[in-house]
Amino acid sequence: MMKPNNVDITATMSLCPHCLARIPAERRTEGDDTFLVKSCPDHGEFRTPVWRGEPRISSWSRPKKPFHSGTHLPLEPRGCPFDCGICPKHRQQSCTVLIEVTGRCNLACQFCFAAAGTGDDPSLETIEKWYLTALEKSGPHNIIQLSGGEATLRDDLPAIITMGRELGFPFIQLNSNGVRLAADPAYARELKKAGLFSVFLQFDGTDDRIYQTIRGRALLAEKLKAIDHCAAAGLGVVLVPTIVAGVNSDNIGAILKLALELSPAVRGVHFQPASYFGRHPGVPKTCERVTLPDLMRAIEGQTGGLMKKEHFCPPGCEHPLCSFHGNFLRLPSGELKSLTTPAAECTIETVGTGRAVSYVAQQWSAPAPVSCCCDTNSLDAFLENHHSNTFAVSAMAFQDVWNLDLERVQECCIHVVAPDNRLIPFCLYNLTSAGGKPLYRRRPC
Ligand code: SF4
Ligand code: SF4
Ligand SMILES: [Zn+2]
């Protein structure tokens, strides 16, 4: 609906940040900026920026057909977002399924969606049940992310990986802060031998002051060692920076330049603007919220135009406002060639989750070893090594209780297996109220 004063409004639903009641909300575009605006009868009005500037939100869409595969029917339906499992109203199937193998962690980060620290680990029998849930509800061709807490704190992680492979999952990825991977070069080899596919490595910047602030101690040397050890073991690594305004929002270009230097072992960078759920230092001021277009423009500005905002396109799987991605070919000259068509005409084969998964998986897999007799100057040899020369840049803007948009969540393809064997969209599983009350995590079944 277009209002006469050039305000564009799209109706959606959200939750009250204080009482978690479902309330109407609107995406309200005023000039270049879009806010999620909502009002609770008991707790007042809330207004959170969700999109800022170019590329315009009106240009950021992607046609796709809804896919209803959910079968979970709660005994007392309460409507979205209280009926997850996945319920029949959900419009997308899983393409990534998270299994949390521990609640323990060896860091105490300022930002942690899981608010990890201590706790008991689930047994191998329980983890097998969760794998079987993922298999039954969404098939084997998902990316399984082993997460936590810090999954490497479990000495039986190789057995957990092998169990997943034997159950039929080809793409098992590890979410890790890299501390154990750095400490023990044999460990990455052990994980690879167990069947691990790739590592999603927490990597917030190229300066230890950033780690000191976000993670509580200097970590850069350990991150670089972890990458070395993964490369030697033949594991592809994706760097995952949490972007916090004023802490590392000016380090985005440096992260990308270092990642390119470390490629092909580093297959790409997946940015995540900080979200305010789980453990976090407090809700940011309006100007401190990092949105996807802020990131796209920062990438262009801080890489001196090596990557441009036009090189990124909306997703074919999840809701368009959830993410962007771009793919590049590193040319022998050091320049990058965009393999992504312009956002408005984006046609790469990711429509439908089956193809999206294999596409993402291919990009994140380790590079093929280069033959020693290969003439690296020949174009043929270069093209043969095409996969090793590709580099992916993406971002996902997770939703917290302040910017939660139920239309987005209903198209979520990133699901967590809850302890009671339900699949729950990642943002809802981790969502906590302003007072720290969880919507799903650690709630009684
Ligand atoms: S988020 Fe999806 S699965 Fe959960 S209640 Fe809403 S429609 Fe159902
Ligand atoms: S995890 Fe959150 S941000 Fe990502 S696709 Fe799901 S709803 Fe969207
Ligand atoms: Zn309220």
Image (cartoon, grey):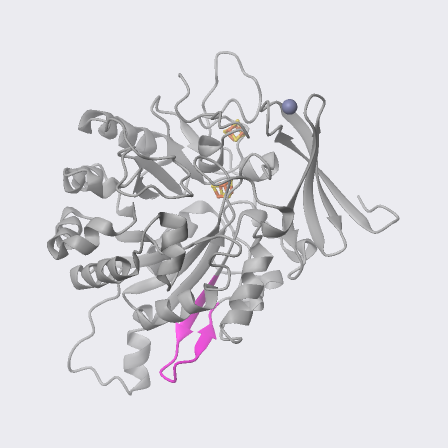
Q: Which x, y percent locates residue 118?
A: 28, 31
Q: In the image shown, does 271 or 96 lie closer to the viewer?
A: 271
Magenta span: 326-339
Q: Is residue 13 left or right of residue 207?
A: right
Residue under the image location 20 percent in, 52 percent down: 181
Quarter placement of the C terminus: top left
Q: Is residue 47 left or right of residue 382?
A: right
In magenta segment, residue 343: no
Q: Which x, y percent locates residue 228?
A: 21, 63
Residue under the image location 31 percent in, 40 percent down: 147
Quarter placement of the N terminus: top right
Question: Does the image show residue 350?
Answer: no
Image vertical order of residue 176 relative to residue 118, above or below: below
In magenta segment, residue 334: yes
Q: Which x, y percent locates residue 311?
A: 53, 67
Residue that lies at the very extreme toward the bottom in this rendered image: 377
Q: In the image shown, does 361 or 8 lie closer to the viewer?
A: 8
- Asked which quadrant contains residue 22, the reply is top right
Q: In the image shown, does 416 or 163 lie closer to the viewer?
A: 416
- Asked which quadrant contains residue 85, the reply is top left
Question: Does the image show residue 399?
Answer: yes
- Asked which quadrant contains residue 257, the reply is bottom left
Residue under the image location 35 percent in, 24 percent down: 421
Residue under the image location 62 percent in, 28 percent down: 16
Q: Which x, y percent locates residue 389?
A: 34, 72
